[in-house]
Image (cartoon, rainbow, N blue to C red):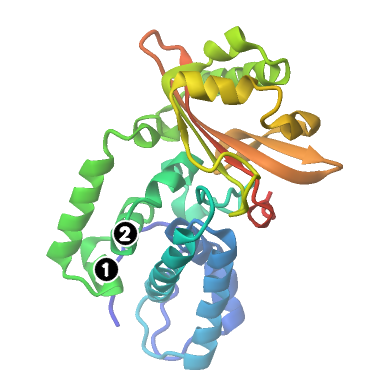
Amino acid sequence: MTVQEQSSEPEAIETGTAMPPLETLYAQYRKYAFAIAYRMSGSAEEAEDAVQDCFAELHRRKPRNVDNMKAYIARMITNACINTINSARSRKETYIGEWLPEPISGEENDPEAVAQQRDMLSYAYMVLLDRLSPGERAVFVLREAFRYDYAAIAEMTGRTEAGCRQLYSRVKRSLKAEPAVTAAPSRRTEQSRESRANLLRRFVDAFATYDISGMIDLLAEQPVFTADGGGRELRTVVRPMIGRKGVLALLTSRRIFAHLREWTPSFEQLGGELQLVFRYDNQVMATLCFLIEESANDNLRIRELYLMLADDKLTRI
């Protein structure tokens, strides 16, 4: 198999005939494989399972004459994740409330291989990717985040090169005006990052004190609040709240989310951006991720909020 690709790190191992030792491949490509799988599935657990299955399959097959092992692994991971996404769709249909991607902290989701594409690390971008079909997501992720050329993507996904090009262009156009794209991390300066930190501090203060006027100053004209309660009833709001009036009522209510105020908030990097993590007795209880945009007068405003309360999606914090 000959696959051309253009991503940078890690360097592809040229195998010639015999496959290198599995330990070598695992050390070289585990983070790279995980990065693809996480962007494809939105689940760290499913991504890790896909990685383990991939290397177990490599051990079983022991493929020979692989010209580019990195692209070979990317193809295996992509196909596995497409199958996972298709099977997960039926589970999401019976999921109570909204399903949100699993947040990840630290550098686990930031391998050198995709350091140049930090935009797709953001949590809001992960939410956006979940709207795509499995085929759209595969082509878009491989091209946008990992810089594979269309010939390589065609070989990985079983599509034609022209079909991949058209699919990518269509998805790119449809996402162009999305806030997660226009407010992407790569567009920010050091000053705007500090402004984000200040905004989050003001949010914590307003939230803790039920400060209605203070919270109004932080919200965009049409904010959206979405929560994932783990598919269980009565954990949280089950449908997105849209509009300043409704979101403001949620965030300043003395009854709703009272438990959040009992937990200790901290500012931490999730998906390459500063977000809020809530802990109780050193255990992560929730995360609150934000999509923040600049208003007309260059002031930052909160456009979207994503509250994660699902226990099984908080294990990577």
Residue beneath disc 2: 133
Name the amino acid, label 2.
Ser
Q: Is mark 1 on a helix, strand or loop?
A: helix
Q: Is 27 drawn above or below residue 315 in the view shown?
A: below
Q: Where is residue 19 in the image (x, y as percent from the top left)?
A: 48, 87
Between residues 118 and 224, which one lies in front from this camera angle?
224
Q: Quadrant of residue 77?
A: bottom left
Which numbered disc covers residue 243? Answer: none
Q: Position of residue 2 (x, y in %)?
A: 28, 78
Distance CA(mark 1)–CA(mark 2): 20 Å
Q: What element carries label 2?
A: loop
Q: Position of residue 33 (x, y in %)?
A: 49, 66
Q: Is residue 10 visible?
A: no
State which tag comes first along the sequence, 1 or 2. 2
Name the amino acid, label 1.
Ala
Q: Residues within 10 Å of mark 1 (few under 14, many from 20)?
A: many
140 horizontally vs 190: left or right:
left
Between residues 155 and 130, which one lies in front from this camera angle?
130
Q: Is 272 drawn above or below residue 264 in the view shown?
A: below
Q: Which residue is drawn at 53% across and 65% down?
A: 47
Q: Residue at x 54, y 59 (%)?
A: 43
Q: Is residue 222 visible?
A: yes
Residue beneath disc 1: 152
Between residues 4 and 219, which one lies in front from this camera angle?
219
